[in-house]
Image: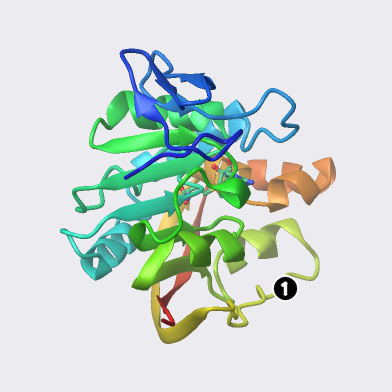
Amino acid sequence: MDILCPVCLQKLTKYEKTYACENRHSFDIAREGYLNLSLKNSQKSGDNPDMIRARKAFLEKGYYDFLRDEVNDLLNEDDSLVDLACGEGYYTAFFKCKDKTGIDLSKSGLKIASRADKSTVYLLSSIFRTPLADRCADQVITIFAPIAKEEICRILKDDGSFILVRPDERHLLELKEILYEKPYLNDASRIEIEGLKFLKEISVSRKEKVPQEDLMNLFMMTPYCNTTSQNDKDKLKQITETDISFCFLIDIYRKAA
Ligand SMILES: C[S@@+](CC[C@H](N)C(=O)[O-])C[C@H]1O[C@@H](n2cnc3c(N)ncnc32)[C@H](O)[C@@H]1O
């Protein structure tokens, strides 16, 4: 897949340890293997090392393997795939597609992803300014991450598909029951994306026993981690093991030609 220069949008050519465009903008391939396309004045940095570490430790225990299998079955092996906000590549690395690109703003995430997975081209970049050409991707996926609606539509080929994985209403409800006096259901309303036609929604869920150590890592990888008071966080430390519901929605869209 052609990668574009984030400065002038010309095609980048790969050299030994760099990529460069005809206007001589040049970008380093990091030691771990990802291509650093972040611009020096960029303020955003993606998930921090603690969040990445917690997510990696939790996912390695296999709690979300059933979801990963379900999504993998929806992909076409011979079609290209772009994973927008791929994190540390837990899903990207596993997906069966032969031509894979993973994009994220977290350096810590991409270090882990690109060290472990040589089957994917990993790019450090914002997904809201994706360094890929118009209509280059057969399949685009976003899993538990911001949705770059315009970029998804721009980089998808006509007739290409977009898969969105997001939490269903009752996802992690028991965790919220421990943390908060008034636990609330997640907003699971369908997301409209201009230029894409909604095709189908698949609901997958499972309940698992989660011990203390994994519970803390799970909490660290949720958005609640930044909004929960220390008092409420301490309640988690008293739980030795609890049942947790993992409930997901997989939405499939097709680019309307
Ligand atoms: C909850 S994590 C999900 C990661 C991965 N999809 C997964 O499910 O394991 C959200 C990811 O979005 C990335 N992210 C957030 N804003 C971003 C942006 N503007 N551009 C690229 N990545 C972004 C974060 O760095 C983080 O890795």
Q: Is 227 in front, or is 97?
A: 97
Residue 20: x and y in percent read 44, 23
Residue 47: x and y in percent read 61, 37
Q: Residue at x 36, y 42 (%)?
A: 2
Instruction: Give the quarter of the image for residue 148.
Output: bottom right
Q: Which residue is mark 1?
A: 184
Q: Is residue 194 left or right of residue 16?
A: right
Q: Considering only vertical position in the picture, is 19 above or below 119?
A: above
Q: Is residue 254 left or right of residue 235?
A: left
Give the residue furthest to the left: 78
Q: Is residue 177 visible?
A: yes
| Crowdedness near tag 1: few (<14), some (14–19) or many (≥20) residues, C-alpha within 10 Å | few
Q: Residue at x 42, y 57 (%)?
A: 209
Q: Is residue 148 left or right of residue 241?
A: right
Q: Is 72 in front, or is 239?
A: 72
Residue 66: x and y in percent read 30, 61
Q: Is residue 232 left or right of residue 131?
A: right
Residue 49: x and y in percent read 58, 27
Q: Considering only vertical position in the picture, is 41 above or below 97?
A: above
Q: Quadrant of the C terminus?
A: bottom left
Which residue type carries mark 1? Tyr
Q: Is 34 in front, or is 57?
A: 34
Q: Considering only vertical position in the picture, is 127 above or below 30?
A: below
Q: Residue at x 60, y 47 (%)?
A: 129
Q: Quadrant of the N terminus?
A: top left
